[in-house]
Amino acid sequence: MRSYRLKIVRRTTHTENIFGLDFKYSGITPWPGQFFQVRVDEGVELFLNRPISVASYKRGHLLLVVKIVGRGTRTLSMKKAGDYLTLFGPFGRRFRPAHRKSLIIAGGIGIAPLHFLAEYMARRNIDFDVLYGVRNKDEFIFRSDLKRMASRVTFVAERGYREKETVVTRIRRMDLNDFSVGYACGPREMLMALQELKLPITTYAFCEDFMGCGCGLCLGCAIMHGGVYRRICIDGPVLSLGDIDFEV
Ligand SMILES: Cc1cc2nc3c(=O)[nH]c(=O)nc-3n(C[C@H](O)[C@H](O)[C@H](O)COP(=O)(O)OP(=O)(O)OC[C@H]3O[C@@H](n4cnc5c(N)ncnc54)[C@H](O)[C@@H]3O)c2cc1C
Ligand code: FES
């Protein structure tokens, strides 16, 4: 882990409340699932750094894609090209995706780390499909990118399409025999519902819980996994979904 003072080279608007920050970056190469702790403000009010996943890293450009949910992410949304931000990282265990037919399962902003995973797999010719769900159909991001990289992409939305669906209702109807492994990221309720389905493929969750230090010290991100407490920031964020105890 290192700290970087990086200049924003481009700010993109994806939807009303989702934006991207593109930095020139030549630091430690990030792995799928890894994230940076972003210093939102130099003042004490927004004291805790905000964890944001790597959404893309290629040709010396690092992309973070952020959904505005509170004060920290709103403050970040006001940054523009030319501004500087301090980033710490990359954090998280280095996770090596399998070289087997895979299914990416994304809910909402959970697509951000999974987009980087998709880039990683496409670069290594790993065959994968994507199932991507959002609440409103105008919330999809990375649509053309995903179509270009994946063998097949299924978009579902709870509102805006004639057929109202979630990734959970759709996956129930899918034949998963073609796949060996799944990677899921999205709201906690989505991960819990997927776990309940007991999918016939090994599935990994990209966990996004509350965080303090980001480096294993505060235990703020502890999660019960396989009968022991693990820290999402250093043991994860990618953990086998079946072993997570969401009740503890
Ligand atoms: C490893 C990791 C990677 C992440 N990657 C991304 C990413 O790539 N893009 C992105 O937009 N967000 C990501 N997040 C979530 C992001 O860190 C939070 O949304 C952000 O810290 C909220 O800060 P805030 O000050 O805007 O909101 P706050 O004012 O702190 O909270 C506003 C609301 O959001 C809820 N909230 C805050 N943090 C989280 C969280 N971690 N999970 C669920 N609900 C939360 C609070 O309960 C509250 O209701 C990631 C989180 C983790 C742990
Ligand atoms: S955030 Fe402090 S231990 Fe994980």
Image (cartoon, rainbow, N blue to C red):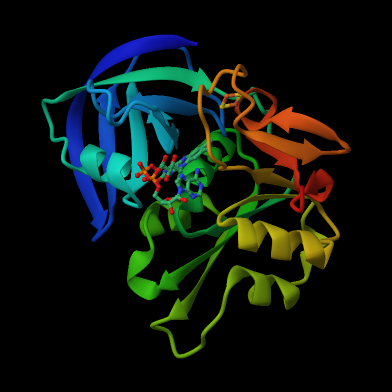
Residue 183: x and y in percent read 66, 48
Residue situated in front as seen by the camera: 24 or 18: 18
69 sits to left or right of 78: right
Residue situated in front as seen by the camera: 136 or 219: 219
Residue 210: x and y in percent read 53, 39
Considering every residue shown, the one lying at the far bottom of the view is 162
Q: For the point 32% across and 70% down, which residue is it?
A: 138
34 sits to left or right of 74: right
Whether residue 71 is visible, yes or no, is yes
Considering every residue shown, the one lying at the far front of the view is 45
Residue 50 is drawn in which quadrant?
top left
Q: For the point 63% across and 62% down, which residue is it?
A: 189
Residue situated in front as seen by the camera: 123 or 158: 158
Q: For the point 77% across and 59% down, which residue is it?
A: 195
Q: In the rendered picture of this protein, how many numbered marks are placed on residues? A: 0
Whether residue 98 is visible, yes or no, is no
Specify the quarter for ligand 1. top left
22 sits to left or right of 66: left
Q: Is 93 above or below relative to 209?
A: above
Q: For the point 27% across and 26% down, which residue is it?
A: 23
Q: Is 196 above or below relative to 184?
A: below
Residue situated in front as seen by the camera: 197 or 55: 197
Q: Is 97 above or below relative to 192?
A: above
Residue 92: x and y in percent read 59, 24
Residue 193: x and y in percent read 71, 65
Residue 240 is drawn in which quadrant?
top right
